[in-house]
Amino acid sequence: MYRGGRVLMCTPAVALMMAAVMQVGCQSAEPVLADGAPVLADGAPATLHVTVLGITLGRGMVRCALYADRATFLTRGGIAEGFSVPAAKERAEFELHARSGRPVVVSVFQDIDSNEELNRGPLGIPSEPWGFSGKPAPLLPPSWNACAIVPTAGDNQIEIHLIGKAR
């Protein structure tokens, strides 16, 4: 073996052990979410029962979107499924459909002026109440890693509290 300008001697047993360690180290790891949970892609149907809390009554619409692809996260074209309901109650219920074992993100916001967009102030901070699945940081832009959840087959309950106040 050659190392740092010196030749090192190694026995066949050491060479086999090094080869085994290198092979294990080179195997691809299973993808994991930010919390370290493994992503298992079995693909069975999963229903997401989303409850949105903290709605300002009578002000616009509550919009809910499901993103199933990191590459198109937070783009209008990336919405796999989306629904809107009037902000007539303090809570809204949505039912979304995904595949178990595959990461998704649920995004919600209260569209106060019903313009179908999340309004932002001069610094890019949302001026309408918003929320995400997972564990988004309230003072940072949402990231796929922080917001992604992995549904299980069957029914999944998700509760999202809106962040921010209706202005």
Image (cartoon, rainbow, N blue to C red):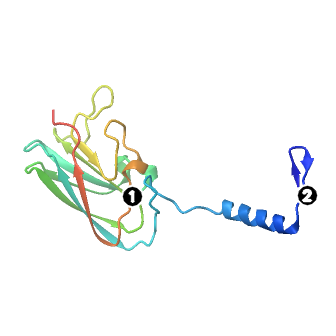
Q: Is residue 118 above or below residue 88?
A: above
Left or right: residue 95 compared with residue 43: left
Disc number placed over residue 9 in the picture, else none: 2
At 32% across and 69% down in the image, what residue appears? 46
Q: In which quarter of the image is the N terminus?
A: bottom right
Left or right: residue 84 compared with residue 135: left
Judging depth in this view, the residue of 119 and 9 nearest the camera is 9
At 7% across and 44% down in the image, what residue appears? 58
Q: How crowded is mark 1: few (under 14 residues within 10 Å), some or many (20 or more)?
A: many
The earlier-in-sequence mark between 2 and 1 is 2
Q: Quadrant of the C terminus?
A: top left
The three-letter amino acid code for the residue at tag 1 is Ala
In percent of width and height, residue 54 lies at: 15, 46
In percent of width and height, residue 99 lies at: 37, 68
At 26% across and 39% down in the image, what residue appears? 118
Q: In which quarter of the image is residue 128?
A: top left
